[in-house]
């Protein structure tokens, strides 16, 4: 793609422009030669008699009109090639820009597309962070290459469909790329439906599916899964129940998929392709699509029956459908309808969500990745909710539904054979609460902070109140998401941490509890502190009336965070501290700012990013200094624990408010200002101890 030349396309565009122009002259009568407009007009107005009236007149009129159709076809071919050239050039430019940015970020990009980090790390956590960066880069490059492949596919197949009948030029009148996508998407939907029927028949007969057919379906879906014409066309060719039954038959038993490695890889690919395709289809608003979506939801409580499966109970439609909801943005109205029926069925089963791991469904395996089983349909549904933040906000701004998802039901860990032992349902819940309270999709690498709407703020407060009340019963899987959510509301959180006597916008006791729960892990603690670093920098930069107030507020916030950390450590044994991974704390620094999910710095100076980075680096040095060689954490006074951080804060404050400080005792020197920050930090820690009743 990076070396793609456009010479041949440019030549084709020039040639087809000439052909288009010639046909246009003939069809419009604007040229000096043949004039089919005049010919058609004369033929229709002339007085024909005998056999000529029966055969001659229709023939002449048809020929004249075919010239119009041929002119439209020539115009469509020229437009298709021109649009493809524009799009491919854009894909190439995007690729060049991305590679340039990745190289600037320290990654090595070989000519064959292989990506490596220019650095190697002995520290395991830092190496994991490096591996994640490389993986993200691969995803970004693959996204551009997929888009380029889709453009090429649409052009090639579009042209084939356009000229498939050498004697019929009718029906071709393309003005935009969307016109091409509609034609190609509809044709590909029929191909995909035929492949699904073949694969379904093989599975129903007990045969191993033909990998060629599976690969072909995946290739087609990968190219067209975001195309509404394809997604809706496939839905119209495949009834709702057949869609669910197809995935039920294909997913098979988990162990079978895991042991057949290549098949398992293709099945994960198929699951993701189907999920993205169904998400696109869910946004269709035609009467036919509205009926298809309702039929799908109506299958929710029905067993999806396949006699040769080994589960003691056949999964119901909600389980099958939810396992296909982990990717893509599903329509908000569809999610509301689906959630209403799913929650009603969940309540009907009873046992606060535990029923999904019983009833014989513990043998149900709808996830070919070996990272889950898919028995609890809330897992896939909540993943879908997190990918549509507007819907997630609706979900948690309502007190009744917030109570249900955060208080009334449990999220049971799945089978112990899972590779990492994590609770998939709880992880999905964490993603959903973050999306609901922030308005951001946690899986969107391009997500950026935006001012909160009233519904998002309401959702945040509902989540905040309910999770704080859980105290030590807060599921560990939620800690990271809660940290990001508090960081996303950093201005409100800082105002509460720094306010005396509970005068902040949030309940200080609840905030201390959540800050403590977040601080049980280095990742959650780093995320929250990174966000608060930015909040206090904003405070220092924007305070104009009395700059000493910014010192007081900043120090109190530092002390509040320190006390939350102390309480979290006090709850952990030395072995638990080591297991949490504090020794590799440095690898987690920068987690919040890198994701651009927290309030931005105030636009009042040109070196703000460097200021935030320096503060972050100083804070990381302080943290690493008090982590013992065995990975345990030492408790010391706030002013001492954050020595380097307070030094940087004092330096920033003096740079910003030096004129105000020049004749005020205690603020004249960097040391004096740092002492003021330290006193405020110790006071903030004492204040947090009071809140905790210690």
Image: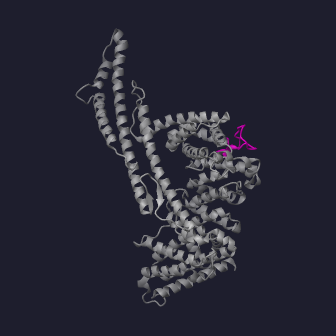
- At horizontal 42% and vertical 60% (from top left) the residue drawn is 103
- In this rendering, the answer to whether 500 lies above or below 11 is below
Counting every numbered tag in the picture gives 0
Spot occupied by residue 546 in the image (x, y as percentages of width and height): 48, 82
- At horizontal 61% and vertical 71% (from top left) the residue drawn is 582
Q: Is residue 60 visible in this depiction of the protein?
A: yes
Q: Is residue 227 visible in this depiction of the protein?
A: no
Left or right, 250 with reference to 182 = right
Left or right, 174 with reference to 122 = left
Residue in front for this viewpoint, 234 or 85: 85
Residue in front for this viewpoint, 544 or 180: 180
Residue in front for this viewpoint, 381 or 416: 416
- At horizontal 45% and vertical 74% (from top left) the residue drawn is 611
- In this rendering, the answer to whether 345 lies above or below 246 is below
- In this rendering, the answer to whether 462 lies above or below 199 is below
- Check if residue 357 falls in the magenta segment: no
- At horizontal 50% and vertical 39% (from top left) the residue drawn is 229
Task: Please state the extent of the stretch shown in magenta in the rendering.
Answer: 299-320
Which residue lies most toward the top here? 50
Spot occupied by residue 478 in the image (x, y as percentages of width and height): 64, 62
- Check if residue 301 falls in the magenta segment: yes
Spot occupied by residue 680 in the image (x, y as percentages of width and height): 56, 83
């Amino acid at each position: 793609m990076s070396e793609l030349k456009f010479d041949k396309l440019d030549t084709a565009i020039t040639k087809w422009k000439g052909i288009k122009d010639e046909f246009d002259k003939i069809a419009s009568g604007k040229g000096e030669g043949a004039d089919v407009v005049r010919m058609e007009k004369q033929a229709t107005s002339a007085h024909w008699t005998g056999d000529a009236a029966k055969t001659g007149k229709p023939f002449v009129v048809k020929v004249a009109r075919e010239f119009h159709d041929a002119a439209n076809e020539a115009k469509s071919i020229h437009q298709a090639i021109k649009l493809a050239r524009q799009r491919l050039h854009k894909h190439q430019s995007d690729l060049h820009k991305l590679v340039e940015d990745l190289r600037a970020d320290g990654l090595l990009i070989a000519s064959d597309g292989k990506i490596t980090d220019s650095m190697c790390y002995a520290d395991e956590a830092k190496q994991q962070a490096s591996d994640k960066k490389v993986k993200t880069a691969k995803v970004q490059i693959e996204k551009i290459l997929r888009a380029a492949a889709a453009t090429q596919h649409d052009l090639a197949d579009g042209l084939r469909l356009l000229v498939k009948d050498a004697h019929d030029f009718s029906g071709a009148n393309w003005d935009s790329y969307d016109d091409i996508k509609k034609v190609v998407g509809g044709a590909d939907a029929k191909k995909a439906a035929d492949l699904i029927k073949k694969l379904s028949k093989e599975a129903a007969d007990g045969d191993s599916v033909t990998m060629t057919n599976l690969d072909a379906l995946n290739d087609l879906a990968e190219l067209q899964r975001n195309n509404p014409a394809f997604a809706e066309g496939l839905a119209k060719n495949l009834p709702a129940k057949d869609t669910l039954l197809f995935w039920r038959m294909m997913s098979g038993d988990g162990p079978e998929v895991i042991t057949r490695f290549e098949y398992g890889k293709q099945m994960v690919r198929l699951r993701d392709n189907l999920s993205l395709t169904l998400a696109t289809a869910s946004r269709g608003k035609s009467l036919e699509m509205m009926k298809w979506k309702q039929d799908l939801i109506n299958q929710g409580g029905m067993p999806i029956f396949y006699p040769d499966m080994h589960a003691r109970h056949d999964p119901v439609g909600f389980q099958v459908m939810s396992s296909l909801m982990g990717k893509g943005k599903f329509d908000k109205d569809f999610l509301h309808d689906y959630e209403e029926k799913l929650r009603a069925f969940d309540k009907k089963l009873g046992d606060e969500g535990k029923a999904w791991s019983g009833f014989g469904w513990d043998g149900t395996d709808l996830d070919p990745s070996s990272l889950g089983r898919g028995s609890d349909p809330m897992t896939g549904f909540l993943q879908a909710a997190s990918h549509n933040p507007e819907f997630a906000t609706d979900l948690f701004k309502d007190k009744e539904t917030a109570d249900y998802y955060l208080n009334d039901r449990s999220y049971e860990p799945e089978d112990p054979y899972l590779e990492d032992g994590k609770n998939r349902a709880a992880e999905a819940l964490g993603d959903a609460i973050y999306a609901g309270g922030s308005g951001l999709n946690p899986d969107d690498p391009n997500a950026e902070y935006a001012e909160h709407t009233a519904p998002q703020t309401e959702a945040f407060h509902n989540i905040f109140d309910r999770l704080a009340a859980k105290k030590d019963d807060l599921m560990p899987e939620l800690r990271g998401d809660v940290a990001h959510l508090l960081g996303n509301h950093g201005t409100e959180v800082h105002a509460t941490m720094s306010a005396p006597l509970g005068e902040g916008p949030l309940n200080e006791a609840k905030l201390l509890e959540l800050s403590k729960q977040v601080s049980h892990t280095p990742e959650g603690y780093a995320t929250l502190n990174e966000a608060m670093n930015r909040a206090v920098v904003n405070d220092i930069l924007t305070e104009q009336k009395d700059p000493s107030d910014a010192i007081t507020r900043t120090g109190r916030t530092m002390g509040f965070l320190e006390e939350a950390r102390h309480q979290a450590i006090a709850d952990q044994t030395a072995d638990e501290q080591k297991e949490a991974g504090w020794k590799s704390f440095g690898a987690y620094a920068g987690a919040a700012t890198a994701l651009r999910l927290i309030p931005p710095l105030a636009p009042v100076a040109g070196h703000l990013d460097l200021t935030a980075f320096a503060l972050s680096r100083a804070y990381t040095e302080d943290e690493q200094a008090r982590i013992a060689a065995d990975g345990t954490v030492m408790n010391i006074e706030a002013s001492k624990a954050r020595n380097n951080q307070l030094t940087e804060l004092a330096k920033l404050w003096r740079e910003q408010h030096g004129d105000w400080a020049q004749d005020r005792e205690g603020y004249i020197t960097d040391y004096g200002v740092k002492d003021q920050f330290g006193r405020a930090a110790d006071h903030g820690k004492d204040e947090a101890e009071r809140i905790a009743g210690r």
